[in-house]
Image (cartoon, rainbow, N blue to C red):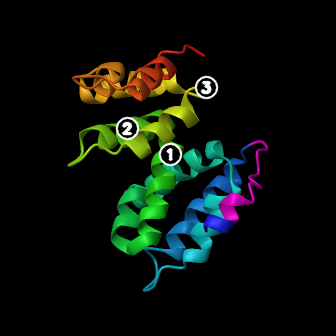
Amino acid sequence: MLLLICKAERNEGIVSLDKVRNDAESLFEAGEAQWETDEAAFNTLFAFESYEHLRFVFQEYEDITGRTLSEAIESETSGYMKRALLTIVRCVENTPAYFARKLYRSLKGQTRDDKSLIRIVVSRCEIDMVFIKNEYQKKFKECLEDAIRGEEPENYEKLLVTLVTLDK
């Protein structure tokens, strides 16, 4: 799956509702409708379709089955495949919320994960950090800048706060 995603050949065309319906049905047939999950069907769809198309597929899947695709993935897959599929679903559904959750875990875990914190802030600061900050505040009732600042801020924390407060 990772190799497919790295190719970056997503179909960014207009979303066809007929294709959405077919893809949702195909995911059901590849997962819940059979004994063993056909991971290739998930890989192909998740790697090549646009986020907009996937959002429609996720909703159509729920309309058809009465379950969210996340629920189906939870029950039908395991291990790294489960983790990869759920990560993609969360990113597609709400990218800023996904990164807000990752930032929270890097700041509030058993030990602070500075490597993840730095990677996320640096990679997202010019893309959607304003939206990530809003999601962080909404979900965790704390300002992201305050969460980053330690009791005695290090120089890199000051830099991260500066990157987080850029309004692009």
Q: Is residue 11 magenta?
A: yes
Quarter location, residue 62: bottom left
N-terminal of the pair, mark 2 or mark 1, is 1
Q: Residues within 10 Å of mark 2 (few under 14, many from 20)?
A: many
Q: Does 142 appear above or below 8?
A: above
- Residue sitting nearer the eye, 118 or 85: 118
Q: Residues within 10 Å of mark 3 (few under 14, many from 20)?
A: some
Residue in the picture at 40% in, 57% down: 70
Distance of label 3 from label 1 (alpha carbons): 17 Å
Q: Amino acid at mark 2?
A: Leu
Residue in the picture at 61% in, 28% down: 127
N-terminal of the pair, mark 2 or mark 3, is 2
Circle 1 SS class: helix
Quarter location, residue 126: top right
Residue beneath disc 3: 126
Which stretch appears magenta? 4-14
N-terminal of the pair, mark 3 or mark 1, is 1
Residue in the picture at 43% in, 45% down: 116
Q: Position of residue 94 (x, y in %)?
A: 48, 38
- Residue sitting nearer the eye, 131 or 17: 131
Residue in the picture at 29% in, 26% down: 147
Q: Amino acid at mark 3?
A: Glu
**Quadrant (top left/top right/bottom left/bottom right) for the N terminus:** bottom right
Q: Does 84 appear above or below 88?
A: below
- Whether residue 88 appears in this view of the structure is yes
Question: Farthest residue in the bottom direction?
Answer: 35
Q: Nearer the viewer, mark 3 or mark 1?
A: 3
- Residue sitting nearer the eye, 24 or 123: 123
Distance of label 2 from label 1 (alpha carbons): 14 Å
Residue beneath disc 2: 103
Q: Position of residue 92 (x, y in %)?
A: 53, 45
Q: Is residue 99 magenta?
A: no
